Image: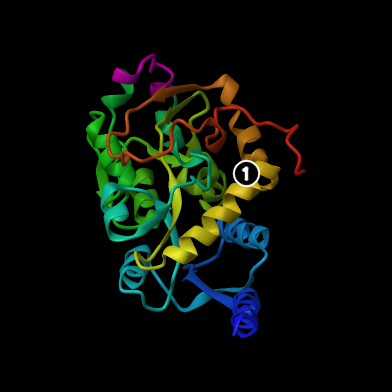
Amino acid sequence: MIKVLVGFILLFSLNAQSASWQITFPRPLGVTSTIDEYPIQLLSLALDQTGVNYQLKPSGNFLTKGKALDRLQDNREINIIWGMTTSQREKDLLPIRIPIFKGLIGWRLLLIRQDMAERFTYIQQLDHLIKLSPLQGQDWPDTKILQSNGFDVITERTQSALMKMLGNAQGDFLPRSIIEVWDELAKIEAENQIQIQPSLGIHYPAAIYFFVNKKSVSLANLIERGLEKAIKNGKFEALFIDNFQTYIDKTQIENRTFYPLENTFLPEKTPLDREELWFDGKINTSTKPQ
């Protein structure tokens, strides 16, 4: 009887190890960029660290952020997503509380029209910047952050609409993260006369997490375990540097004034006390995987 039981346990363990995890993420809209590809690379790295068999694939349909969140909450079509954390998202879904971009999404440069360049040279403090009107997406978490810091934010639904508004002087600047702004600027037609303001930026703590369905506790634990292992052995940092050092170098953070903003919408369990999880304004090129 004992031999049979031991054999059953061994068989169960072998089957568990050989089982393949089917992980489906939202198929992105349009042409992908580093900001789209990096989370998939990081997720694959984390799963590799656990030693499990897995299949990582995009959804059959193209999904907007809103639809993807709905699908995940209903446990249909996809079983993972990544996005900026909010208290409501953490109520609706199960967060893996490791900021996958190390907070870099909260380091923002300012897209402006060239005819506004001189005016921005007179900005010497945050109060001066608050007098101008930023543009942001209607449902972006950043919109509420800016509003809570005193900005009169002008909103639209899509990124392309915001760019057109900026070019048409329907707003004064469009804050975009270090990891977004360079690729986006490259796609803008020259006649739009839009540039990155060279000396200023804003910064607020912001975390993009992987999220799974509330019932997918095993999957969340698996991914978290893999991420923590990659953090410990340096592979997380190496992947981060490989993807984003070029953008950080272009930004020339040491030559810019970043005005700090408060983010009162961060959930209480955001791991702000874990310094290794956050970009601190520097890049550590000495970090190598063990």
Q: Judge whether residue 211 can be spotted in this image.
A: yes
Q: Position of residue 261 (x, y in %)?
A: 35, 27
Q: Quadrant of residue 154?
A: top left
- Left or right, 17 with reference to 71: right
What is the quadrant of the N terminus in the image?
bottom right
The residue drawn where x is 33% and y is 24% is 129
Give the residue type at disc 1.
Ile
290 inside magenta stretch: no
Q: Position of residue 2 (x, y in %)?
A: 61, 80
- Is 125 rendered above or below residue 59? above
Q: Which residues are magenta?
A: 118-127
- Which residue in the protein does label 1 denote? 231
- Is 70 rendered above or below residue 39? below
Q: Position of residue 182 (x, y in %)?
A: 56, 44
In depth, the one of 205 and 34 nearer the eye is 205
What is the quadrant of the C terminus in the image?
top right
Q: Quadrant of residue 33?
A: bottom right
In depth, the one of 39 and 145 nearer the eye is 39
Q: Position of residue 128 (x, y in %)?
A: 31, 19
Q: Judge whether residue 35 can be spotted in this image.
A: no
Going by the picture, which residue comes out furthest to the front?
1
The residue drawn where x is 56% and y is 62% is 32
- Left or right, 118 with reference to 245: left
Q: Mark 1 falls on what kind of element? A: helix
